[in-house]
Amino acid sequence: MRSSPAYRVFRVVALTVVVIALLAPLLWMVAASFKTNVDIYDTGKALAFSPTLDNYANVLEQANYVQFIGNSLWVAFAATALSLVLGIPAAYSMSRFNMKKSALVVLMARVIPGVSLLVPWYYVFSNLKMVGGFSVLVLSHMFVSLPLVVYIMMGYFDSLPHELEEAALVDGLTHIGAFRRITLPLSIPGVATAGILSFIFSWNNFMFALVLSGADTKTLPVAIFDFVGYASIDWGGLMAAASVVTLPIMVIALFVQKYVVSGLTAGATKG
Amino acid sequence: MAAVTTPTRPPRRATETPDTPAWARWANDHRKWLFAAPAMAFVAALIIFPLAWTGYLSLTDAEGSVRAESEFVGFQNYVEVLSDTDRFWPAVGRTAGFTVVALLFEVVLGMAVALLLWRPFRGQKWVRVAILMPLVATPVAVGMMWRLIFDPNIGLANQALGWIGIGPQPWLAGQHSALPTTIFIDVWQWTPMVVLILLAGLTSLSDEPQEAARIDGASAWQRFRHVTLPLVMPTVVVAILLRGIDALKTFDILYATKGRGGGSFHEVETLNVYAYGLSFDYNEYGISSTVLIIFFLIIIGSMWALTSRRKESQR
């Protein structure tokens, strides 16, 4: 359907406003991360400032951020890998055998507020001497990513035709063999979507790590708070810290945007 | 592609030779549960016991340490919480206000942007990339970012207001402006989500009803109101459902911008923030569990209300 010239002009203007509104705050954060605290307080130097890397040096060296980046990476990778291992077969079964009620159990995890589980978790895991360790962080982050993986993969398996698998059975594969050698390779795009989204959600997760991490296992979103003091805030350091958390995940999303979008909208249009 | 049932189902064990090991045969026959059980067991273990325990704690006077002895007090906590007009009911009000207002803005703005992006144009890909950025940005970092922008003295927001001759506003620092400001931040971060969902819904519509209405001389607004909107309504409900659940549970942005207790006047203390504070700042496990059970019931209730409306709208 063609649109009128007037509408096209309006659309350009409106979308420009939208893009600026979405990107300007992020650019402002990154700009502030290159400013000294003196320049941040000087409103005259909003854009005309001489950039400094001091904040980043501070964040990466003194504030121990290299370790926290490692923690975040490790927790997100482990939670994603384990969620894929548990979630893909489960999603396959639930899609193939139409196990709606079983799927509901897993998807319940999306609905329940995390706080309501944290007190019992804290009790059990501290008795098991696991609080402050990596395993408890991985487990709690899996609680977020596993339902995500199951949800996305169920939709993906629903869209794969069964005939290929059935042909493989005739050709001499077992059911599990057909899943492993035919269905799984065909669902790589779905696995990529589920994996990327699970990584992003785990990387961004805050509340579980706030309660369950220790000084050595802190993840990046929790570590940001080190820059907020009682009396004053080290704005330059804080913005550098925020940039260090946010920019990598945005760069990843930039390169794999197709998968991120299909993951976020998975199942939305089926009604 | 729709799954078509093939007329001739292959024999169940087409390939099993006598030397297939027994465990492989068993695994094959029980794959339905073998595949599903680990994930279900994992989630169930992390949900069912904790939820039951939270339910139990809500009937006790547990406080101090999670290991401390506690006494069964029946529904006393519920009476106490439900008659608490100081912290609990204001928190319920803020939760409801936050969710409803944020959702309203997100759906209306999201629909507007989705409509702008609906028809292909040059540079569409770049607009989509821009839309994705707030979505993947870490919410805690986003909270910190807006905290700088909304700083009353040095923030960009008040500078920008100064350029157009409006006096500085307290934003997050104000007792009455803090909650609206956090709603603004939520709208900034999550409207893109609604855009993506609605855009997926819009692009899956067929063009014919639109064309027919256009030929009949319907104006753009009439076409949207009477053709597009009813067709895309199921997707709108999905967007409200997905976003609504998360908006009810908002924690990161509130904690990052106002800290413990939702600020010194509890000005952004929603049920989630309140329950978190009771559990981990004050160790009032009995009361916090009561709040959580009530919160949980509210969430299930609103989900149920929305899904039953969804079924109605499909009829």
Image: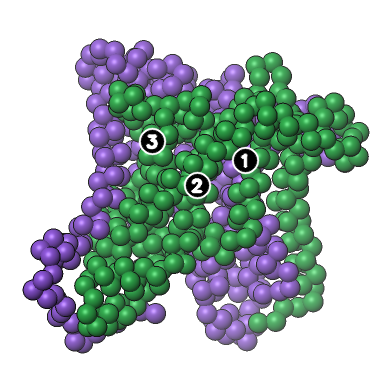
**Which quadrant would the C terminus of chain B be assigned to in this image?**
bottom left
**In this picture, residue A203 sits left or right of residue B24:** right
Residue drawn at 38 percent across, 57 percent down: A151
> As rendered, which of A213 and B169 lies closer to the eye?
A213
Q: Position of residue B69 (x, y in %)?
A: 25, 12
Task: Give percent across and percent down for residue B74.
Answer: 22, 20
The lab-note entry on whether marks 2 and 3 share a chain reads yes
Q: Determine the residue positioned at 62% across, 25% down.
A: A226
Sequence-first tag of 2 and 3:
3
Subunit under mark 1: A
| Residue bearing the label numbered 1 | A245
- In the rendered image, residues at marks 3 and 1 fall on the same chain: yes
Residue B136, horizontal then vertical, whole percent: 59, 50
Q: Which quarter of the figure is the N terminus of chain B placed in?
A: bottom left
Task: Tell which chain the image draws in green.
Answer: A
Q: Which residue is labeled 2 in the image?
A: A201
Q: CA distance from mark 3 to mark 1?
A: 22 Å
Judged from the image, the secondary structure of the residue bearing numbered disc 3 is helix
- For the point 69% across and 68% down, which residue is it? B124
Residue A150 appears left or right of B222 = left
Q: Nearer the viewer, residue B106 or A235?
A: A235
Q: How far separated are the C-alphas under marks 2 and 1? A: 13 Å
Q: Chain of mark 2?
A: A
Q: Quadrant of residue B186?
A: top right
Q: Residues within 10 Å of mark 2 (few under 14, many from 20)?
A: some
Q: Amino acid at mark 2?
A: Phe
Q: Chain of mark 3?
A: A
* Colour chosen for chain B: purple
Residue of label 3: A135
Viewer-nearest of discs 2 and 3: 3
